[in-house]
Every structure is written in C-alpha cells, then in structure tokens.
Image: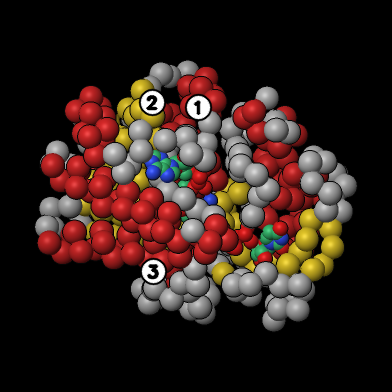
C-alpha cells in the first residue's frame, strides 16, 4: 500500500516507517521537523535499504498538503503528527488545539478532497482519564486532565463524526500506552528536545551522564511499592501494531478502536531496577513529591487487538531497557552528533 506517514520523522513514526518498509509498503513521510530531525529519516533509509520521499510540510498547510497528496497519491494515512508535551500543553493550550486539532481538521479536509478515506490515528491512553484499570476500549472517555489529552479525545470525536456522516471512511483509532525502547540497531530512538518530561528518556540521560539524578515523583501512591504503575510497551511492538492496523483497514471497513499496550503494569521503581539490572549502569535517584496530574495506575486490557488485529506485544521490560540503553549510549546527544 502507498502510505503517507504524518509525523514520520518522530520517535514512533520513524520506527513505524521502518516496519512498514520491511513489510513491503511504500512510504511517504510528511513532517515539519518541529520535534524531530531529518537524520532519523536518513537512518530509516539506511536500516531498511530503501529510499522514500520526505516532504517538509506542516499539516496545517492546506496547499502544501494538496501538493503532497498529488505527488504521493497515498492509499492510506497514518497520522502521528502532533505536539505531545503535557506540561507545555497547559502553558500553551492554543498551540496544542491549533496544531493537533486544527492540523487534523486540515488533513481530513484534504483527504476528503482527494477521496482518500483510510486513516490510522495515534491516540493515547490519556483519553481514559480516571477509569479503573485494566482499561478497555468500551470504557467512557474524555475525562482528560490536560489540554494535550483533550486534543486526543477531541480528534477521536472528530473522526467518529466524520465516520457518522460518511461510513465509507475506514478509521482506526490506536490508543497507545507508554512507548519506550528503541530499534535493536541503536540507530533510531527517542530524541526529546530539551529536558525530557517522560520517565525513560530522563532516566537514560541520567545513566549517560547528561543529567545528574532521576527524581521519582512520589512513593506514597496506593501501589505495592508506592510508586506509579504504567503499561510500558516497546516502540517496535507499537510500530508493528500499525502494520496490523493497515492490514485491518484493507480487510475490514468501519471505525474501530484498539488499545496498544502489554496488559502488564510496572512501577517506576520496577523500571529503575530493571534498567540497572540489565545495563549494570549507575543510576542516581531520589524520591521527590508527586507530580501534579499523575494517576496511581494506568494499564491496558489489549485483548481486542490480539483478537481482531492478530497483534500482541512481544518484548518484555528487560529488552525495553537494553534497547533504550543501546540507543542512548551510542547517541549520547541524540541525532545531533
Ligand atoms: P514525536 O514528537 O517524536 O513525533 C511527532 C512528529 O510530528 C514530530 O516529528 C514532529 O516534528 C511532527 N509534527 C508535529 N506537529 C506537526 C505539524 N503541525 N505538521 C507536521 N509535522 C508535525 O512524538 P511521538 O512520541 O513519536 O508521538 C507520535 C504520536 O503519538 C503523537 O501524536 C503523540 O501524541 C502520540 N502518542 C505518543 C505517546 C508517547 O508517549 N510517545 C503516547 C500516546 C500517544
Ligand atoms: N516519572 C518520574 N520521574 C520522571 C518522569 C516520570 O517519576 O522524571 C514517573 C511519573 O510520575 C509516572 C511515570 O514515571 O508515574 C511515567 O511518566 P511519563 O511522563 O513517562 O508518562 P505518563 O504516563 O505520565 O504519560 C505518557 C505520555 C502521555 C500519554 C500517556 C499515556 O507522556 O502523553 O503516557 O499514553 F498520554
């Protein structure tokens, strides 16, 4: 299939492009590089041994999108492009609504103009809000605690409304849990700009000596060791989930929602111990007060993806730590070296 990947230079997008190329698909990447580097594209080409076109374009630029669609003639879109920093979304909500929501409206309008109605969208476990885990697709959504999360919820609703108005669209909403890890080559991985907000990039930057110490946000939650529990999923497993979603789009019509998680929860301390255990690296850490907005436990029921997409996560927590460390230690300054 000819697949346009918006945000394809980013962390999950680059890993997905590699899996799509290896799965025999034709890939076209569209990204404005606001949170990524063209070096990631180069490395995906190097790893796959295949060439593909990259369009430096913003999803809010309608005429730019039209030019891309005319050239690439995609049969499906995987839509990763978006801003994703929770804290920043609270400080700059308009930027998030404009980029994520406005950008998706623009993208869907151009898709409609070109008669292209196949889309896979990157949603997030954040749409479940305070539901009790394990979280499953039929639970109510929308109780999000920040503007970033609300853009994900609103985009889901927008896509549902498009489908309700025209059921010849084929839409898959993928709700990711916590992606970590990197490709086994150590050539592509997560490359956050500035000081990382998320646990794994922060922890690996401490391990490589870029940051002094990891703060563990709270050890007084109602969990076995008092630290928060999340469903960490290897980014390559997540990327493979997109390949399954594309296969599903080809076979089955309609709008469907799938969780992509492992179904297992690990605490922050579990992750720290697994990282030290698998890498042998020194990792200074301290317990600090809770971070506002964090939930005690978030993990998936991912049975639906297993049953209908034929997908399940293969990699465990040790492998996630090993691959994160290979990427971080080989590229201490990310793509900048
Ligand atoms: P990322 O920042 O690495 O990738 C997003 C890409 O989109 C970047 O390359 C960025 O340059 C591009 N982009 C942003 N705005 C754009 C615009 N207006 N036009 C064109 N390109 C634009 O993030 P990621 O971790 O790879 O996440 C990919 C998607 O998955 C995002 O939509 C994110 O919200 C979603 N998601 C991520 C996580 C996570 O923890 N990483 C969890 C759930 C959902
Ligand atoms: N944490 C620390 N120290 C840090 C960073 C994080 O202790 O320096 C803790 C957090 O308190 C939390 C856990 O590690 O308990 C995971 O935190 P992350 O920031 O890595 O991930 P979140 O679960 O908060 O959120 C992530 C994404 C969201 C997405 C959500 C579900 O940032 O965008 O996963 O997919 F919505």
Q: CA distance from mark 1 to mark 3?
A: 35 Å
Residue linked to disc 3: 137
Residue 123: x %, y % from top left: 41, 57
Residue at image point 20% right, 43% down: 111
Q: Are marks 2 and 1 in contact (CB under 8 Å)?
A: yes
**Left or right of 34, for residue 229:** right
User: Where's the N terminus, which quadrant?
Assistant: top left
Q: CA distance from mark 2 to mark 1?
A: 9 Å
Q: Give 305 or 200, whichever is nearer the viewer.
A: 200
Q: Nearer the viewer, mark 1 or mark 3?
A: 1
**Left or right of 249, for residue 274:** right
Where on the picture, by quarter, is residue 71? top left
Q: Is residue 60 above or below residue 139?
A: above
Residue 94: x %, y % from top left: 41, 59
Residue at image point 47% right, 50% down: 83
Where on the picture, by quarter, is residue 306? bottom left
Residue 205: x %, y % from top left: 75, 44
Where on the picture, by quarter, is residue 269? bottom right
Q: Is residue 198 above or below residue 325?
A: below
Residue linked to disc 2: 54
Label 3 sits on a secondary structure element that is loop
Mark 1 / mark 3, whichever is N-terminal: 1
Residue linked to disc 1: 38
Number of marks present in the image shown: 3
């Amino acid at each position: 299939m000819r697949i346009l990947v918006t945000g394809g230079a980013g962390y999950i997008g680059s890993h997905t492009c590699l899996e799509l190329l290896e799965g025999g698909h034709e890939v076209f990447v569209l990204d404005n590089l606001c949170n990524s580097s063209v070096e990631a594209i180069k490395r995906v080409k190097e790893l796959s041994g295949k060439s593909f076109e990259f369009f430096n374009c913003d999803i809010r630029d309608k005429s730019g999108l039209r030019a891309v669609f005319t050239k690439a003639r995609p049969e499906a879109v995987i839509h990763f492009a978006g801003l994703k920093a929770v804290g920043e979304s609270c400080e700059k909500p308009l930027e998030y609504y404009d980029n994520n929501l406005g950008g998706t409206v623009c993208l869907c309008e151009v898709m409609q103009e070109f008669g292209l109605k196949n889309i896979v969208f990157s949603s997030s476990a954040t749409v479940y809000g305070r539901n009790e885990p394990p979280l499953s697709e039929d639970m109510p959504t929308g109780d999000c605690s920040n503007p970033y999360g609300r853009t994900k919820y609103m985009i889901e609703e927008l896509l549902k409304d498009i489908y309700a108005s025209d059921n010849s669209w084929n839409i898959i909403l993928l709700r990711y849990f916590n992606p970590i890890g990197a490709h086994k080559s150590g050539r592509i991985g997560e490359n956050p700009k500035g000081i990382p907000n998320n646990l794994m990039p922060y922890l690996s930057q401490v391990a490589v000596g870029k940051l002094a110490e990891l703060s563990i946000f709270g050890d007084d939650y109602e969990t076995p060791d008092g630290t928060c529990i999340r469903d960490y999923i290897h980014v390559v497993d997540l990327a493979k989930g997109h390949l399954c979603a594309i296969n599903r789009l080809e076979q089955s019509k309609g709008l469907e929602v799938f969780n992509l998680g492992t179904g297992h929860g690990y605490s922050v301390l579990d992750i720290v111990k697994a990282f030290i255990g698998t890498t042998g690296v020194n990792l200074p850490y301290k317990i600090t007060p809770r971070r506002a907005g964090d939930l005690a436990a978030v993990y998936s029921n991912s049975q639906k993806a297993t049953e209908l997409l034929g997908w399940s996560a293969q990699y465990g927590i040790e492998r996630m730590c090993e691959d994160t460390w290979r990427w971080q230690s080989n590229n201490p300054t990310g793509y900048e070296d």
